[in-house]
Image (tube, helix red, strand yellow):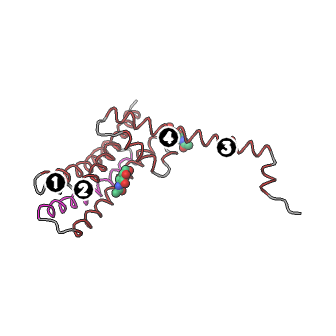
Amino acid sequence: MKTNPNNVFSSNPLNILISILLFCAIDTMMAQNVTLIRNTCKSSSKNNPNVNVNFCITSLQSAPASRCAALRGLEIIAIRLLRYNVTDTRCFIKQLVTTKNWNQFYKNRLNDCYELYSDAIPSVKKAMQSFSGKLYDDANIQISAVMDAATTCEDGFKEGGNEALSSPLKKRNDDMFQLGAIALSFLGILQAGSSN
Ligand SMILES: *[C@@H]1O[C@H](CO)[C@@H](O)[C@H](O)[C@H]1NC(C)=O
Ligand SMILES: *[C@@H]1O[C@H](CO)[C@@H](O)[C@H](O)[C@H]1NC(C)=O
């Protein structure tokens, strides 16, 4: 006669108890760190008007492993998100240039943005290295450079051209700027914590 291993397992009260305790412990730890994301995003948006609290929470929570991260880990996740955004947008611009018959104004602007995003890739890579090496001031400068790239790209479209077309990169530039602001803000919190 075969015994069902599930029955053996579930008929042992000790196993059930251990499982319940384990699930509760994991659940509590996860809840704590969702709270960490929420609280850090909240205090960031209070101190920095560029940080939108909902964007901050959504972005970080959707990143893999963010629930298990302490503040340092969250900063790494923020810089990583920024890096993915920069890389993806650079590629997007390259494709965008070829999908439409842009007028010369737009062609020039898109090419400028492509250059800006190309330069932002080494900056965001360096930011990660600086952060890992605890060179927080350098990381600050490098993250700021990435945010400047997004701002400069977006401002280019305001200088003229067809109003009706406006900036085809607005959403992406905004996302980049936001992610940069989050990374800077978290960095500031870490720096403040490590100096006392
Ligand atoms: C950029 O990051 C934001 C926030 O995490 C995300 O919503 C968006 O999909 C990302 N965009 C790209 C192109 O990766
Ligand atoms: C949650 O964050 C804390 C820091 O606030 C960290 O020490 C801890 O390891 C994290 N919890 C989990 C489950 O990783």
- Residue at (31%, 45%) from the top-left corner? 178
Identify the secondary structure beneath mark 3.
Answer: helix
Identify the secondary structure beneath mark 1.
Answer: helix
How far apart are the alpha carbons under marks 4 and 2? 31 Å
Task: Tell us which disc is closer to us: 1 or 3.
Answer: 1
How far apart are the alpha carbons under marks 2 and 1? 9 Å
* Mark 3 residue's CB less than 8 Å from ligand 2: no
Q: Which residues are magenta?
A: 104-133
Q: Amino acid at mark 2?
A: Leu
Q: Amino acid at mark 4?
A: Val
Q: Amino acid at mark 1?
A: Phe
Quick one: 19 or 124, which is closer to the camera?
A: 19
Counting other residues with Cα less than 10 Å from the Cα at mark 1, is it few (<14), some (14-19), or many (20 or more)? Answer: many
Dot 1 corresponds to which residue? 157
Task: Tell us which disc is closer to us: 4 or 1.
Answer: 1
- Residue at (33%, 47%) from the top-left corner? 179
Dot 2 corresponds to which residue? 169
Left or right: 65, with 108 as reference point: right
Dot 3 corresponds to which residue? 22
Q: Quadrant of the C terminus?
A: top left
Identify the secondary structure beneath mark 2.
Answer: loop
How far apart are the alpha carbons under marks 2 and 3? 47 Å
Dot 4 corresponds to which residue? 34
Task: Tell us which disc is closer to us: 2 or 3.
Answer: 2
